[in-house]
Image (cartoon, rainbow, N blue to C red):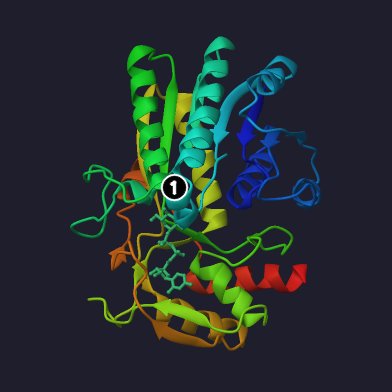
Amino acid sequence: MAVLVAGGAGYIGSHISIELLNNNKEVVIVDSLMNSNEDVIKNIENITNKKVKFYSLNMINEDELEKVFKDNNIESVIHLAGLKAVGESVKKPLEYYYNNLVITLNLLRIMKKYNCNKFVFSSSATVYGQPKTVPIKEDFPLSTTNPYGTTKLMIERILKDLYNSDNSFRIVMLRYFNPIGAHESGLIGENPNGIPNNLMPYITSVASGKLEVLNIFGNDYNTKDGTGVRDYIHVVDLAKGHIKALEKIEKDDGIFVYNLGSGRGYSVLELVNTFEKVNNVKVNYKFTDRRPGDIAECYADISKAEKELNWKPTKTLEDMCRDSWNFIKNSK
Ligand code: UFG
């Protein structure tokens, strides 16, 4: 009996695969390698001293994906595959809707055919749109501001409809806040191609001299120091949340939704200052205009996940900054 990790060679998927192997699960990874490479699979095996079965394929191809279910006894699926750049999704909406929706539909249709009924979906805090208050709870109103976010929300709705039509499905939707950090080995982490969109990879690129200066998008927000506030969570804590989500649906029937964050809000400046301090490096920055679509403050109420999943993040902001930098130094 194996767990299929769709998108398992990516930044978050690779950390989840490590946690699954550490919990003695058999792991099958499917990944298009669009945003990663096969070395990640070797590193997962080196870290855990265990083997994974890897398929390099694009899930748009239903026949190839079905072969994975034919060849293996897949008991449950963790689905993280998809296009994920917010800005790009505004420019290429058709690509985002086609890719993210069709691969998910292919996966669910094949699961139904093979009587595989346990599904964990990687959703996002982006489904809360512009929240009126913080901390954000799971029952807050949902809306989106870009096509990427809309694909996440549409998939959540598809999953609800699927469950209503067939309650043998057991589903968990996990709404991630801002994952950063890396595996403590320094072998697995986030190192996107090209100019990074997100804050931490931008910070590490400036610290390593790849980019000259970090643009801090706005210092006139109504926050503690004027810069944007987000809920950063260590990717290993996030990955552990998936193990707990699987345990939940191994035990209970139903469809569930949880926020996965640290439950704390940190400003851009706090993150930059902590990064500089724990790593003893300089990050040049300047203030620029606000980034269109950004909100002032976004952090999670994580009490539902703490209570129902028996999960609690344990890593500090210092750990996150240290591990992010350790991975970059190690991969140079
Ligand atoms: N920021 C900068 N400069 C940069 C990049 C970011 O100042 O170069 C600031 C942003 O304005 C924001 C904070 O850093 O205040 C975090 O920005 P990120 O781009 O790292 O993350 P976001 O919170 O904007 O977006 C993330 C994910 C999305 C997801 C969203 C859900 O990247 O995929 O959280 O809340 F949809």
Mark 1 residue type: Trp
Q: Is residue 186 above or below residue 167?
A: below
Which of the four quarters of the rendered structure image does ligand 1 lie in?
bottom left
Which quarter of the figure has residue 292?
bottom left
Please provide percent x and percent y for residue 278: 57, 82
Please provide percent x and percent y for residue 2: 67, 26
Q: Is residue 163 above or below residue 130?
A: above
Q: Left of 281 or right of it: where is 257? A: left
Q: Is residue 20 above or below residue 85?
A: above
Picture residue at 37% right of the left edge, 65% below the top: 230
Please provide percent x and percent y for residue 246: 51, 33
Q: Is residue 302 above or below residue 184?
A: above
Q: Left of 126 or right of it: where is 35? A: right
Residue lying at the far left of the rendered structure:
132
Q: Quadrant of the C terminus?
A: bottom right
Picture residue at 69% right of the left edge, 35% below the top: 29
Q: Left of 198 or right of it: where is 288? A: left
Disc 1 residue: CB within 8 Å of ligand 1: no
Write down the residue under mark 1: 311
Residue 310 in sight in this render:
no
